[in-house]
Image: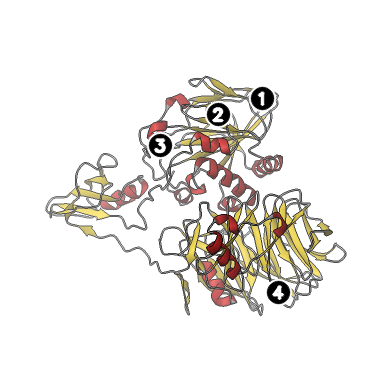
Amino acid sequence: MWPQHPYAVALAAFSSDSRVLVATMDGTARLWHVSGQLLQRFQHRGTVTSAEFSKNELLTGSWDKTAKIWKLRSPKAAGLAQKVLGCFSCFQQSRDDCITLEGHQHAVLSACYGPNCVLTASVDGTAKIWDRRGVLEQTLQGHALGVFSASFSADSRLVLTASWDRTAKIWDAARGVCLKTLEGHGLAVRSALFSKDGAAVLTASDDGSAKIWNAGSGACLRTLARPGHAIRVAVFSPDASVVLTSFDDGTAQLWDAGTGLCLQTLKGQVRPLLAMRRGFLGGAGVSQRTSPVAGTLATACLMQFFQAQSPVCLIEDRLIGPSPCQVTKAGCTTESSAPKKPKLRRCALPTGNDVTPARTLVLKQAVKECKRLSGCAAVTAQVGRDFLLDEPYDWHFKTRTEPCEPNSGFRSLVLPKAEAPRRTAWPGPAPLAELWAMGAETVLEDPPVVRFEHFLSDEEVAYVKHMASNRFEKSSVGMTYETGTSSRTSETAWLSRREDNLDAVLVNITARITRATRLGNENMEPFQVVRYQVGQEFQGHQDYLDEQESQVCGGRIGTFFMYLNDVPEGGQTHFQHWNFTITPRKGLAILWWNVNYTKLQHGDFRNGKNMDAWHQSLPVIEGEKWVVNRWLHPYDFLTPYHQGRLR
């Protein structure tokens, strides 16, 4: 078993000699032997998005706009250094141990080896070919938007790119000329690969389809579609007779490439990893989040069918060791089984630990309500001598499930663990000293309010504004989503689609928010982009909603607020009780907490709304104002949100 990583895993890559590279959201990549021995550590300034092994080298791409070629030490040498020096620094690379490929204007999302060269692809819309010394040889420019992935054909004469602009392109690697544009997808093309013989191309798109193309003519030969679910990656089997697709809902499907028929659906309560690349299966796995023994379901499937290495396991986004996942002849499964049906017991649960006052409901309604309530683990009611399923009783909602004293006049039901609301593992807000180390400036010390200058880059600002531009609706207020109120006159665009959770730009922004708040993406409401025109405002309010307190997510304990432009006049955010005003500035971010800070530090999230966090967005006098925020919750928000359990 390996130690847990301090940050969420962004990518895992496998070598042919039992080594595993694990990259976390903070830009650190660690090289492990499958036995659990740490061999080396590599550092980028941004999240690692791509990795590939080649003999004694490792190639990585990163959100810091670079790719790097690293020299690898043998496991024996790394083990000797650790034993002799006894320090972690011996795992780190010196500057002489790597070559940095600089030239892209935005994040490098893909990096792979050719025979004597390296190929990179970037959000800046280009792919670049470099020699092994880091000298730029060719720039492939022609996509209208960012390039997700780039790969060589088997003979390295052709390059294939996939882009946000809904196309894939085939290029002449030597001349940098586009030979074919593959058009037909309705949304961004996430990945594109040649078959081993170079005769076919496989593309995967957010529109829910994968397509097989003739590499010579550019004609579409087959469409493998599952509408409504974005495909994050698609790969050929070695003989190109089978295609495996991995979807954003955590399922995967095997297809007959010749007929286009689905051979098998691989299901599980899983979530896709962020980065999905070719050959080495980095990120092609998906993690089971509710079982302590579940692992990478889709990775295990890929390894069964496509002859890869032994899988490793992801638990709560931390890759921690050899996987306990099983692969069977009937398909891929995990050791966890479906939750057992809850059993109604003739006993009474202890008094004094109710989540909320008793409610008169039938049993089915009581169970549904318990699932919705934050902290509820069981229900109990006094029913008398005869109990009827469709008869209403006064049900109590309990946090404790034991002891349950035998009593024929009571009925109690404990929710299955797989369905019980998740307890938060949040360690509490980061101390000011830790935030200062991240570049924060103090606005208010008690309770802490901090600001981060240049938190968003100009490219990120432009990207978020473009993403929101066609989603605006009249702004609403509260959980009732009441629109047209005089207190809030702006327009709102929610970046709340399932595929938005895996968008590379949003993921990178979220990683930085996580570092500042210690809360994961699942504890945040979706990105909310708000646009104010001249005269528009949001009158005084508190972000904390009382009605959310009884829901599974808990209340909005904090707000992470980011400005997307400078406002010529007006549009300030004013906190009247704390007596300060924030002037909008492009890229600026503010973090404040909406509840009693002392209670928050002790993990008490109930009845702690701090009315001093009352604030307002002043009217815009000149120009317009763009902001984006994420509201923070103590418990998982996104899972019940996408399940429709919060409205």
Q: Amino acid at mark 2?
A: Thr
Dividing the image into 4 quarters, which one contains the N terminus?
A: bottom left
Mark 2, residue position: 442
How much space separates mark 1 and mark 3, taking CA atoms? 40 Å
How much space separates mark 4 and mark 2, taking CA atoms? 55 Å
Query: In the structure shown, which secondary structural element does the residue marked by tag 3 occupy?
Result: helix
Query: In the structure shown, which secondary structural element does the residue marked by tag 1 occupy?
Result: loop
| N-terminal label among 2 and 3 | 2
Structural crowding at the residue carrying mark 1, measured as other residues with C-alpha within 10 Å and reported as few (<14), some (14–19) or many (≥20): some
How much space separates mark 3 and mark 4, taking CA atoms? 54 Å
| N-terminal label among 3 and 4 | 4
| Residue drawn at point x = 53 percent, y = 59 percent | 86
Q: What numbered label is drawn on residue 392?
A: none
Of tags 4 and 1, the one toward the viewer is 4
Query: In the structure shown, which secondary structural element does the residue marked by tag 4 occupy?
Result: loop
Is residue 336 something one can see in this rendering? yes
Dividing the image into 4 quarters, which one contains the C terminus?
A: top left
